Amino acid sequence: MATGSPLFNAITIAGDYVTQRTTGHRNMLTHLASGSIRGGIPALPFADFVPASSALMLLILLSGAVILLRAVGLLILGPRYLPAPEVAMTTLLEVILCPLLVWAVIGEKPGRLTLIGRAVIVTTVALHTLRRLVRIESPA
């Protein structure tokens, strides 16, 4: 099985969410930091370092140290409070929001298949959420 295959990716992410759910209230953010360092060090020889302006360095720092840290941190904490499939479906919203941001900021128009894919994801998440809400409100 190739590491780039969607099935391998889905299995790995599902395993990660299930594992995070079973860790209880142990702080996994330190594992995030150590994993990032252990993954980044072997990649250093292959990195192409180009001179960057101070404004670009500030944006890189903001992206890596603030935005990415918070996003991944919430993905680590999410499975404690939600079932793993719901966390996985919520992460699919990134697939919808990123092209919309590109559309809004840069003006690049998404294709027909992109819009259909977004509609499928939004419909699935909405139906799943409605199903859970109905289940919670109805006495069992």
Image (cartoon, helix red, strand yellow):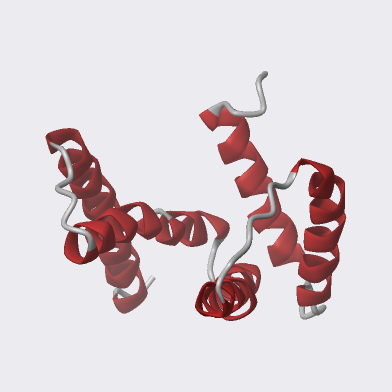
Percent position (x, y) of residue 111? 16, 38
Closer to us: 23 or 100: 100
Q: Say which quarter of the image contains residue 25.
A: bottom right
Count of labels in the image: 0
Q: Residue at x 82, y 78 (%)?
A: 26
Q: Is residue 108 above or below residue 54?
A: above
Percent position (x, y) of residue 74? 58, 75
Percent position (x, y) of residue 81? 58, 75
For the C terminus, the image quarter is bottom left
Q: Say which quarter of the image contains residue 46.
A: top right
Q: Residue at x 40, y 53 (%)?
A: 92
Q: Residue at x 60, y 28 (%)?
A: 4
Is 118 displayed left or right of 50 in the figure? Answer: left
Q: Is residue 75 above or below residue 46?
A: below
Is 85 displayed left or right of 115 in the figure? Answer: right
Q: Residue at x 57, y 79 (%)?
A: 54
Q: Is residue 9 above or below residue 122?
A: above
Closer to us: 55 or 39: 55
Percent position (x, y) of residue 47? 73, 47
Closer to us: 116 or 107: 107
Residue that sits furthest to the top in the current view:
1
Is 74 displayed left or right of 90 in the figure? Answer: right
For the N terminus, the image quarter is top right
